[in-house]
Amino acid sequence: MKPTLIFAYGNFDREDDGVAWHIAKMLAQKYGQDFPDSPEDEVPLPGPYPHIQFDLQLFPELAEELVNYERVVFIDAHTGAVPDDLNIQELSPSFQNSPLTHHMTPQTVLEIAKTLYDAQPQALLVSVRGYQFGFSRELSAQTAELAAQAVMKIEVWLDH
């Protein structure tokens, strides 16, 4: 497998907002990798590809890590504002303004990687519709079904 990073992000304590954690865990199991049961637990050192990471949000420092990868998959949740329940799109580097101070898009991380480190990994965004955002670590039935579909789509992309 090409050097690949799977970067999942979201709030694990807010039901469907934590779907990326669940997808990352399923992918780790499919690829025979250890992955903690909770985000509070230590993630093992990277083994074979794909490398899988989870965090609450994207951050500029991730751009430097992308130098080590030919491909990256970003996984997140979205609300009903996105028309497709399972949104999958190839990404290009592009700085995107945000009125929020703690918000960064995958395209912006890619632009930072390109500008500062001349790194341009092939990139994919997989975002899954969330239906419930209460305080729980469980997924709604609808989002859990979409998460399983997302895993299959990511596997196909990784295998090509």
Image (spheres, helix red, strand yellow):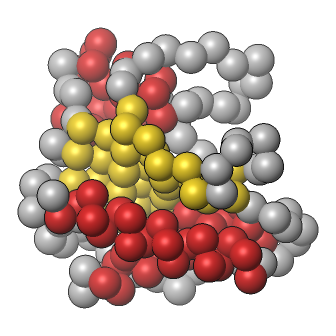
Q: Is residue 52 above or below residue 43?
A: above
Q: Nearer the viewer, residue 7 or 126?
A: 126
Q: Quadrant of residue 133?
A: bottom right
Q: Position of residue 122 (x, y in %)?
A: 24, 38
**Residue, x 38% and y 65% (percent of image)?**
153
**Residue, x 42% and y 71% (percent of image)?**
151
In which quadrant will I find the N terminus? bottom left
Considering every residue shown, the one lying at the far right of the view is 134
Residue 41 visible? The answer is no
**Residue, x 35% and y 57% (percent of image)?**
6
In the image, taking residue 64 as reference, residue 96 lies left or right, namely: right
Q: Nearer the viewer, residue 21 or 122?
A: 122
**Residue, x 23% and y 61% (percent of image)?**
158
Considering every residue shown, the one lying at the far left of the view is 1
Residue 20 visible? The answer is yes
Q: Position of residue 115 (x, y in %)?
A: 29, 13
In which quadrant will I find the C terminus? bottom left
Considering every residue shown, the one lying at the far front of the view is 83
Q: Nearer the viewer, residue 72 or 40?
A: 72
Q: Position of residue 51 (x, y in %)?
A: 27, 62
Q: Is residue 16 above or below residue 100?
A: below
Q: Quadrant of residue 15?
A: bottom right
**How many labels were placed on the picture?**
0
In the image, taking residue 129 as reference, residue 43 lies left or right, namely: left
Q: Quadrant of residue 96?
A: top right
Q: Nearer the viewer, residue 61 or 142?
A: 142
Q: Position of residue 98 (x, y in %)?
A: 69, 19
